[in-house]
Amino acid sequence: MSDISLGTSVAGIPEAAPRQPPALTTGPVAWVRANLFSSWLNTALTLVLAYFIVRYAIGFVDWAFVNAIWSVPNNQTQACRALKASATPGACWAVVTEKHRFILFGTYPYEEHWRPALVCVLFTALYIVSGMRRFWRKELALVWIATLVVIGILMWGGILGLSYVPQERWGGLPITLILATFGLAFAFPLSILVALGRRSSMPAVRVLCVAYVELIRGVPLISLLFMASVMFPLFLPEGINIDKLLRAQVAITLFAGAYLAEVVRGGLQALPKGQYEAADALGLSYWYKTGFIILPQALRLVIPPLVNTFIGFFKDTSLVLIIGIFDLLTAGKTAVVEPAWQGFGVEVYLAISVIYFCYCFAMSRYSQNLEAELNRHRGR
Amino acid sequence: MSAALDTETHLRSAVRTDAPPAILLDKVNKWYGAMHVLRDVSLQVATGERVVVCGPSGSGKSTMIRCINRLEQHQEGRIVVDGTELSDDVRALDAIRREVGMVFQSFNLFPHLTILENCTLAPIWVRRMPKREAEELAMHYLTRVKIPDQARKYPGQLSGGQQQRVAIARALCMKPKIMLFDEPTSALDPEMIKEVLDTMVGLAEDGMTMICVTHEMGFARQVADRVVFMDRGEVVEQGAPESLFNDPKTERLRTFLSQILRGH
Amino acid sequence: MSQTSTDPRHFRAPPKRQLRLSWADERVRAIVWQVVIVGIVAGVIWWLVRNTQHNLEVRRIATGFGFLQREAGLPIGEHLIEYTPASTYFRALSVGVLNTLKVALIGIVLATILGTLVGIARLSKNWLLAKIAAVYVEVIRDIPLLLQLLFWYTMLQGLPAPRQAMNPVTGVFLSNRGLRLPFLDWQVAHSWALLAFVAGLFGTWLTARALRRKQMADGKPRPLWPAALGLIIGLPLVVWLAGGAPTAVDWPALRGFNFQGGFTISPEYFALLIGLTTYTAGFIAEIVRAGILSVSQGQWEAAQALGLRPGVVLRQVVLPQALRVIVPPMTSQYLNLTKNSSLAVAIGYQDIVSIANTTLNQTGQAIEGIAIIMAVYLTISLSISFSMNWYNNRIALVER
């Protein structure tokens, strides 16, 4: 029963010296044997896969680097077209070189591009700071508000000597980041209320929250975006017109709110019943109990799935392309509409994929590490 | 050898010296990576013999009995079970596993099957037994482990002690010649240990060949024909329970025993 | 204890709590809160409805679904049912629904197959295979689906024109007009053979059950394959022969600027199907992997120690447990795939969203158009989750 650990146990008695295992069971050679050539089937599989990897990797490197054209003078794309039709095709990265400013910042005034660039940096910094556990304090909310205000000033301008840039001219990566970040900032509080409502003891509140969540989750985001772009103007009193970007932002917020609410609800359910009872026993009112005892713990539990939901939702902002809002993807698609550059969509889409991948991969790695860390703490 | 250790409480030995050994381990070696976990382990178990294996955790005792039905593979030496040598031959392995029952520390019942289905699964799929017959057999063994009334329940609805008794019944339904127990009581609450040990004593009384990894010294004294003490992957000392416990020859066993006793 | 007693003293109804009309009473508070919240929501909805009605009047838009009976006049390239531009809007929308189902159902089947393979590959002992699967999952999940769809569509458009079409196998042509395959010149006998094939599958299932029952009765296992071979291959073959064994094949051939004949998979459908399948498979792979990992090593060991062969262990012990973990998240992936098929509108595949969108642009019936889209998806979503919940309840684990 009482397990005795090896370190403190029987020692000091002569014992047979440990022998080395038979040859080729440790070391890199053994690793290769065990993981790549452990049986005939495995060896065959390894060889086939290696053949395909080498073959396609060579093909890709030839296309993307060796034969590629990196820049052309004055939109003269004949060289690119010739390359594409040749026996040794290559990528025409010139389209990215030429159009990268447009893809990243859309139609924002060219000489003011440092502003959206700074906005992207600020957003990224905000994500990084929010991800660090030592900054998980109440002050973080203030940092968010301050950063978002600075971002607003930078984008619009009109004060502090910055020239005014109307919203119609915004575009590219800042739009993607704005939609995702503002969407999260508004959807998150909404989702907490809805999640609490779904677990409320009041039937009418519960029904409303369930109806909201299930309705939104049952329909595609596109239908909500259509609703925002065509039906929204009908909803409002005559004469009031809301900007298209803002309407899309509302649709995205409502959409994200429903999905986040389910994640938060998971956290509320995962919290042991004892925590609720302990809070009740202290005689706290509902809002005190919820705000100071239940929510902080429940949210901590669901941070990894919240990050995963946010990743999904970051990718989903690209759907605004369908209602014609100028985000990163729309900018990329528009870049190859120009006759000179038609047919080079693959290069542009690959470049945009790299940007999305960097953001999403970083977030997903972060969520995995955080999950492992939280599990470790809970295990103790 | 067994005649000498018969005490009032000890079971009568059922060792049959005329038959070939049920299990034979000859200079078995095993490594995990570079770690040498079994070092020249040699052990012979006669038909009807009851062997208790003890030793500190990490001493290789579980690894050894898991090698016997090839849940782990040894790298050097020979293991012969019921006259068949363990090798890469799948058919030989199937034959051995049919004759060797095993009970695990963590029960490992199948949670999606009822108690009865847990017991009839192997007889139906391995022994090709009609379902009705398999169920009768299962009920017979469930009665023996004293839980026939739980047959229609699922493992999740039973206590740990009950689950372990079901696991024993499940292994018995294959009518094995040899039973291996891998710390069957370590995961149990104290009040449930006795019911499982009683079941095991009952088995021993019927003359089952058993190898049992356990720290239950009372069980060893009452049932074992022989106790094997392992430490750091090797068999350090073995002998009749009384002589081993009362008169340990090595310092390692003495230290181990003092720690066990302090633990109790 | 006293449940069986008939002594009336043991029964007492719980005391009825008096409702005190005071703010201190919990139930009064609850009622007031609910009235307030419902009031606010109802008020907002009423305000929106009133605005909408007013706006519609001002813009002279008539509401109602009368437009469904009007002639649509919109061309649809792919239709599973009879359709011409002279058909009604209702017909056009029905075509859209069928097109959505066509891509969603096939996508679900393909994504499940691919996802399961990739999920198993990630657990492979072969390091190279496991790494490739891991990279696939990571890359595919971190790039927006819409971007992937546009990528695939652009790739397909970059293929040569029909005159220079790729011709990997005789009769198969891949060009920027899609994939052309030779196809049977469809006869009644083919329909019958297909029917016989389905009947054969069903018969095989019945036979498997009967054989299983017999095995349970006398313990002897019986092979299924002779019956399966006869029913699944033999039966359709006999029906086909009886129907005159028509073998005519419709080969695609280049006429002018495009191909004629054969079976076409349009580039839009092809791109959408590839995109949806590969994207969803990335998520399904992770679900399958988690499901397999959720069955502990101890279950394998216990089953092996009982002498069960690996195939039986997989069928009787591992899969039934893994499926319990896999089914619920798999359901939401199926739902996601179905909802994501609405991205078809971005690459010009005419699904329900695309057709409803055209309809609302042509008729100005915005509310009705969006209501139709939502109703269709809600119906699909609810029916998938309903049937999956039913299945899930059936296989749920009994716990203490």
Image: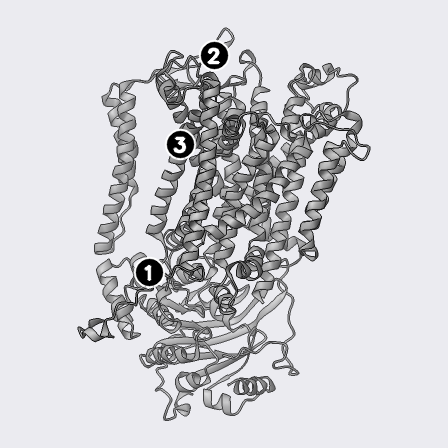
Relative depth, front residue between C381 and C299: C381
Q: Disc 1 to disc 3, how far (Cα)?
A: 51 Å
Nearest to the eye among marks 1 and 3: give it. 3
How many labels were placed on the picture?
A: 3
Q: Quadrant of the C terminus of chain A?
A: bottom right
Q: Residue furthest front?
A: C21
Give the secondary structure at mark 2. Answer: strand
Instruction: Answer few, some or many: residues within 10 Å of disc 1's Cα (few below 14, many 20 plus, some between 14 and 19).
Output: many
On the picture, is A377 further left or further right than C238? right
Give the secondary structure at mark 1. Answer: helix
Residue under label 2: C259
Q: Do discs 1 and 2 belong to a common subunit?
A: no
Residue under label 3: C375
Relative depth, front residue between C22 and C164: C22
Inspect the image, locate mark 1, and give the three-letter code of the amino acid beneath it: Ala
Nearest to the eye among marks 3 and 2: give it. 3
Image coordinates for residue C143, horizontal then vertical, percent = 60, 36
Q: Residue furthest right?
A: A161
Residue under label 1: B122
Inspect the image, locate mark 3, and give the three-letter code of the amino acid beneath it: Ala
On the picture, is A361 further left or further right than B131? right
